[in-house]
Image (tube, grey):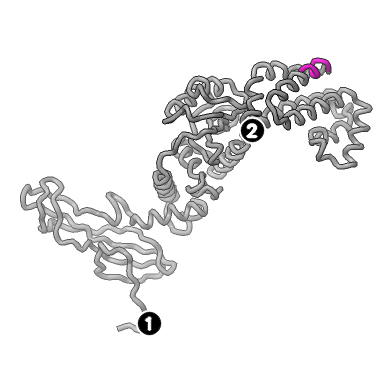
Amino acid sequence: MQDDCIAVAMGLPGLRILRQRELGDRFEVTVRYRREEVNCPVCGKVTNKEHDRRQQRKRDRRLRDKSVILILIKRRFRCYGCGKVFTEPDEVFGPRKRTTRRFREYLGQEALYQTVNRVAWKEGVGEGLVRRCVAEQIGKMLEAKGTRETPEIIGLDEFSVRKRHLYHTAICDLENREVLDVVEGQGRQKVEEYLGRLPEPEKVKAVAMDMHEPFRQAVQQCLPKAKVVADKFHVVRHINEAVDKVRSRHQGGNTKGKRKELFRSRYTLLKGAEKLADGEKEKLTRLFLCYPEVHKAWQLKEGFRAWYREKDRIKAEKRLTELGDRIIQSGLPEFTALLPMFSNWRDEILNYFDYRITNGFVEGKNNRIKTIKRMGYGYRNMDNFRMRILATNPGCGGRLSHLLT
């Protein structure tokens, strides 16, 4: 008997080890199922009459940094009653599988913490197998979480799947900070279909979104008690763009005629007044003396920023009207172009003062989705892409940004 080895349990009690050998890069273990009798799948009678047997090579988890090949002696039995010939059940591996269930579960778990490519290379398997294992693992996680209750606060935002050609919409629970679902397109129909399936639509109190008309129509159709809140940051972005257009108009288009002091101040003009350093304040003061219209644009921008700090909706309504009058008086075409937006979305913009919510979380999720898409070099299968996005939620490996590579 050898005195330089130890026996290690395989952890597969349903199998009996017949023989084993160690090669340079792997262990080969010949096994068969312990059962001596099986039930016929046709008539249900018990039989122990073996018809024939064959060998199948299957993969298991590594042992001592070597791959483990299980050589399964797979038997076929003949039923005494009906004469049917059938293959014995394969609980350890699964029907038509070349790997053990625990090995596939291990691959799926490993791919949650490192890239699919790396797991496939380390384990010496194909990337397709690892991807299927990840999908199976994520499916189990999502199933374990169960059905969600209808959230009170929802966020909607679209993200690009193929630049300028294809968009999808992320629907998020802003209170619990997780993605509820991802629907194809950025139109009204698919969003309506999802919102219409919510078990208790009357529970939804507010929905944050950018100023996208199909989203508003979908919410009004399916969630009549919910208030639409125009995202604060999208409104401020339109204001900042107007300021930048005023600066660009005075700066000049061609390189030779460009006024460098305006170009060098493009980021300073967009910074909040309370965040300006003393040197930046002096720089802007000199700039405003030379360009009064830029000064007007900057004052309007700061007026809107201060307006968002109002704590009362009634005061906010009054100040919004005053800001509209100031835009008209300024005579700046870049700002007067925003008046239809404030008119068409006035109630939704003011709803922010009832529910102080933004789409910041959804925007952050969208950035993460784009990162996942780039790391995976894109996805053709929408169901697969959707499932992997949902897997970034808390409780489903949500902190693992490299999940879908």
Residue drawn at (83%, 27%), measured in percent from left and top? 299
* Residue 144 among magenta residues: no
| Image coordinates for residue 43, horizontal then vertical, percent | 10, 46
Say which amino acid is labelled 2: Arg
Crowd rating for badge 2 (residues with CA inside 10 Å; few <14, some 14–19, many 20+): some
Q: Quadrant of residue 145?
A: top left
Q: Distance between the residues labelled 1 and 2?
A: 70 Å
Looking at the image, tell me whether mark 1 or mark 2 is earlier in sequence order: 1
Say which amino acid is labelled 1: Asp
| Image coordinates for residue 42, horizontal then vertical, percent | 13, 45
Q: Which span is picked out in magenta?
A: 324-329
Residue drawn at (66%, 24%), measured in percent from left and top? 350
Q: Is the magenta stretch mostly helix, strand or loop?
A: helix
Instruction: From the viewer's side, name the closer residue of 339 and 334.
Output: 339
Query: 173 left or right of 198?
Result: right
| Image coordinates for residue 226, horizontal then vertical, percent | 53, 25
Q: Name the residue under label 2.
A: 356
Residue drawn at (68%, 25%), measured in percent from left and top? 313
For residue 156, above or below residue 324: below
Q: Name the residue under label 1.
A: 4
Crowd rating for badge 1 (residues with CA inside 10 Å; few <14, some 14–19, many 20+): few
Give the foreground label among 1 and 2: 2
Instruction: From the viewer's side, name the closer residue of 308 and 138.
Output: 308
